[in-house]
């Protein structure tokens, strides 16, 4: 995750960081913010983010950046940009966690509730150990080749023919 405030971010790609990025912009203070355009030149895309503007794109493949914000003198306005990176190992672990949980009879909502309710260090350690165990079980299922991990069991999959 990356957090910026009124920052110019030169055009770049995140080739060593993320394939998919989610950027959320929020405004603080009072008054206008001039300039500060976000752009993806390859798509011919350029826009001025406002509060709760969201962009989702492949940050490893698409050059992107933000021009400098201009805030008039005496104005308290500011813009925050929050970038969240979905890295491929994290995505693989999420898929394996779902597979391991499914084969163990635990749904992800139960695991999420266990983590949210773990207040003591010992309870947090238990949840972390369970998560590691479920990811390992899911990886083992993927390695045996009998699981199509990308297919969400909640969706009815049909052939295109």
Image (cartoon, helix red, strand yellow):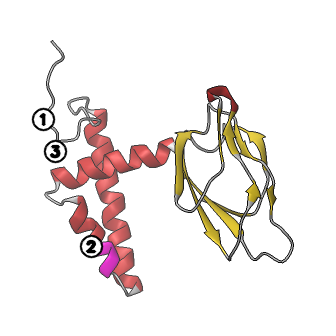
Q: Of discs 1 and 2, which sits in the foreground?
A: 1
- Binning the other alpha carbons within 10 Å of mark 1 as few (below 14), some (14 to 19) or many (20 upward) gives few
The residue to which callout 1 is attached is: 156
- Is 144 situated above or below 128? above
Residue at 24 percent across and 32 percent down: it is: 148
Q: Quadrant of the C terminus?
A: top left
* Viewer can see residue 20: no
- Binning the other alpha carbons within 10 Å of mark 3 as few (below 14), some (14 to 19) or many (20 upward) gives few
Q: Nearer the viewer, residue 135 or 152?
A: 152
- C-beta proximity under 8 Å, tags 3 and 1: no
Q: Nearer the viewer, residue 17 or 97?
A: 17
The residue to which callout 3 is attached is: 154
Residue at 78 percent across and 75 percent down: it is: 75
Residue at 68 percent across and 76 percent down: it is: 30
Determine whether the residue tagged by mark 2 lies in a helix, strand or loop. helix
- C-beta proximity under 8 Å, tags 3 and 2: no
Q: Position of residue 119 (x, y in %)?
A: 37, 86
- Is 51 situated above or below 15? below
Q: Quadrant of the N terminus?
A: bottom right
Pick whichever of labels 1 and 2 is earlier in the sequence: 2
Q: Nearer the viewer, residue 69 or 131?
A: 69
Pick whichever of labels 3 and 2 is earlier in the sequence: 2
Residue at 18 percent across and 51 percent down: it is: 102
Q: Which residues are magenta?
A: 113-117
């Amino acid at each position: 995750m990356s957090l910026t405030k009124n920052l110019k971010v030169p055009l770049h790609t995140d080739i060593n960081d993320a394939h998919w990025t989610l950027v959320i912009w929020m405004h603080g203070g009072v008054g206008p913010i001039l300039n500060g355009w976000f752009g993806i030149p390859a798509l011919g895309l350029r826009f001025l983010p406002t509060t709760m503007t969201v962009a989702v794109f492949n940050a490893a493949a698409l050059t992107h950046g933000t021009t400098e914000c201009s805030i008039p003198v005496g104005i308290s306005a500011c813009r925050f940009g929050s970038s969240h990176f979905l890295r491929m190992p994290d995505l693989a672990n999420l898929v394996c966690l779902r597979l391991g949980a499914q084969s163990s009879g635990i749904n992800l909502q139960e695991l999420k509730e266990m983590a949210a309710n773990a207040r003591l260090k010992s309870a947090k350690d238990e949840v972390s150990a369970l998560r590691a165990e479920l990811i390992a079980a899911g990886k083992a299922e993927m390695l045996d080749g009998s699981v199509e991990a990308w297919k969400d069991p909640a969706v009815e999959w049909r052939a295109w023919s």
